[in-house]
Each structure stands twice: as structure tokens, then as C-alpha cells.
Amino acid sequence: MIESKIFTPCKIGPVTLRNRVIRSAAFENMAYHNSPSQDLFDYHTAVARGGVGMTTVAYASVSRSGLSFDAQLWLREEIVPGLRKLTDAIHAEGAKASIQLGHCGNMTHRSTCGCTPVGASTGFNLYSPTFVRGLRKDEILSIADDFGHAVNLAREAGFDCVEIHAGHGYLISQFLSPYTNHRRDEFGGSLENRMRFMKLVMEKVMKAADDDMGVIVKVNMHDGFRKGMQTEECIEVARELEKTGAHALVLSAGFVSRAPMEVMRGAMPLKTLRYYMDMKKFWWLKAGIALAGRLMIPTVPYTEGYFLEEAKKFRAALKMPLIYVGGLVSRSKMEEVLDAGFTGLQVARALVRDTDFVNKLRSGELECSACGHSNYCIGRMYTLEMKCHSCTKDLPASLEKEVEKAEKQWKDYNARA
């Protein structure tokens, strides 16, 4: 067994993890009817058994209006027993359990969220596509309360930590970004005003978390396009989150509705995306991808640890614990990240490929994940449960060719880099 700092304990607020590897809150698409399922239970239990310090159950909406997918968790009283069964199983494997809490804002449709989608400002969202209504002040205060209530439900369900989603163009991020926030009241305009909703949410979250739950916040380092948030403003947001008492930040980037591959890197597997997409529900999107997919979802080159250099700027500006996320697949890069002063490491695709990745890394069986960065799992997850192509039976020949081409492309790219 090969030891390294990766496998040493670390603390996030009041919570101690057995090692520094955290399964990131990558969307599983396994919460059928917005409730925990056997698939969700089996996957996270397997990840816990596979050696992570903590596994994060992906995006759970704090209210019905915050749902963006049919198979996405909606955290409410009736699903607490099912979640408690999951957290008990995770704890039995020696890992801690976290749940990501958020509200998708304008990135949804009436058919999913049950109302006209809401956001920081009124407008039209091409992501759905749908008209969006700007939130009234009383609704803003109510949603902040929903976050606090969700933290209490998470405690009841046995979670050790919560991760507040303040990035990627979801509701908190929509208030932060000048691209989506055009308000003329106290919640819009200056950065101080645009941070106001985030601060209200964090006030409720920290009060509910009290002294027995860890609070992590996922935040952008940049939005990924000219009219969005840039690094300098994002550092100011991170400093404000440090003042709220948050225990750790996850440093990410990108805007799902505007720059989706900035988050995940590589190419969106368009054939896979179209193949699995429901024609009746998403005919317009399927047609658009067929006609102009690369323009709609441009490729962003993948390299291992693609956020690290920018994340170091945040490390220099902040004193609080920081968790790195972004393309980690090897022991050597993980150790480089920890040596740069980061407390924890978030991993997703390597654990989609192999839930035993951490145990194999620790034993020396692996030095690097076999993930080839084809992003098949991403193309599939918008319709079916997230799964690696290596775990999928009877893959159509056209999708096999897409996977092979993508894996060769990124292997060649990184050989030249």
C-alpha cells in the first residue's frame, strides 16, 4: 500500500474525513420522480466502499421551482427516510456523506418545475427555451429560507456536510453575474448588490448548520465568456463567502446555459447526446444539435488539472480551506494540487469509470484512471443515469466510434501540449 498526503485525514468545519478525496456533485440523473432510488443508493454506496473520504449526492433542489430535471432530487420531508437509508450505508463503509443544495433559477421549464421559471431578471432562456420571470423581493427572501430549511432536512437525513451551489449559472450565480442580473433594485447593479442574495442564503445556511454540519460552497472562478463574471470579481465573491463563515469552497467555473464545456472540458459527444435524447420532449434541441451542435456547445480543450493555475490565485487571496475540482485522474496531479495548499480534491469522471478508483490508487494497483475523457457519461446523463461507456452493454457502433475518436483526440492533444 502506497501512502501519500492524498490518504491523510482532513477537516471541513466540524467534520473529519478519512482522506482528501471527495466524490464531486456531478449529476447522476438517478433520482427518479425527484426521489432517491435504488440506483442512487447502489452508486454512492459503491463509491464509499471504493475508498473516498466523502461522497456528494448531486444537486438537490431546495424547492419545486428549483428543479431542472425529472430525475433530480427535490429535498422535502417525504424523501428524508430514503436519504437516511443512503447515508447510513455510506457511513457503514467508513465515508462521510454530503449533499449539494441549490436552485436552478431560469434553467428549467414549466413542465419540470411546475411554474413559470424564475430568475434574477425577467427574460427568455434559450436553454429550455422558455420565458423567465424575475423574482420579487418577497420571493427572494422565501428562497433564502428554503435553503436554511433544506440544511435542516439534510441533517435529519444523516448528511455530514452540505454543499451550496453558487456557481455554473444556477440561481445564486444568476444573481452574481452581470450577464443574467439586470435588476435595478438593491439586488442588482454593483457587485455588492449582486452578492446580496448569496449573503442572505448563507446567513440562513450557517444558522441552520450550527456547529455540527460542514458547509461547503461551490463557486465560480470565472463564467467563461466576456459579459460574465471574471476572475477578479470572483475572488471578491470568495472573500465575502469566507466572511460568512463557510468552512470550505469548491473552485469551479463555467455557465451551463452559456459555456457548458468550460465546466467539464473536452468535447460534448453530440451523437451520444442526440441518440439518448427524448425526441418528443426535446425535438427542438435535438434538431438544433444536429444542425449546429459545435456552435451551440463549443469544445474547450481538456488537460489534467485544467483549473489549477487559476485556483492558485484564489489560494493566495484566501485563508479558508479550498477544495480543488477539475480533471483530476492521476496520483501525481492530485499530490501536486495538495502540495499547492488545497485541503481536498473533488473527483467525478474517474469514479464514474470505476467506483474503486481510490482504493486502487492507494494500493498501487493504479497510478491513473483509465478514463479517456470521451465525455460519453456527460452526453448520456441528460437523458439516462450517468454511466461510463465501459459499463454500458451493446453500445451502438456509431457511439463506439465517437468514443474512440474523442479518446484519441485528447490523447494526441495532451501528447503535443
Image (tube, rainbow, N blue to C red):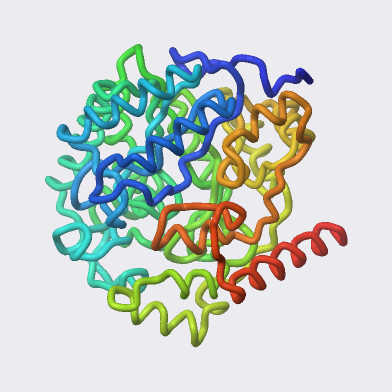
Residue 135 horizontal/vertical position (percent): 19, 55
Q: Is residue 400 visible?
A: yes
Apparent side of residue 154 relative to residue 95 in the rendered image (left or right): left
Residue 206 horizontal/vertical position (percent): 32, 23
Which residue is at 34% across, 40% downward? 38
Which residue is at 51% across, 45% downward? 234
Residue 22 horizontal/vertical position (percent): 55, 31
* Depth order, front residue of 94/290: 94
Which residue is at 12% across, 45% downward? 138
Q: Is residue 137 above or below residue 292?
A: above
Quadrant where the N terminus is found in the figure: top right
Corner quadrant of residue 316? top right
Apparent side of residue 366 relative to residue 41 in the rendered image (left or right): right
Q: Is residue 311 above or below residue 344?
A: below
* Depth order, front residue of 417/57: 57
Which residue is at 26% across, 57% downward? 119
* Depth order, front residue of 205/190: 205
Q: Is residue 322 visible?
A: no
Which residue is most to the bottom? 291
Residue 5 horizontal/vertical position (percent): 72, 20
* Depth order, front residue of 343/191: 343
Corner quadrant of residue 151? top left
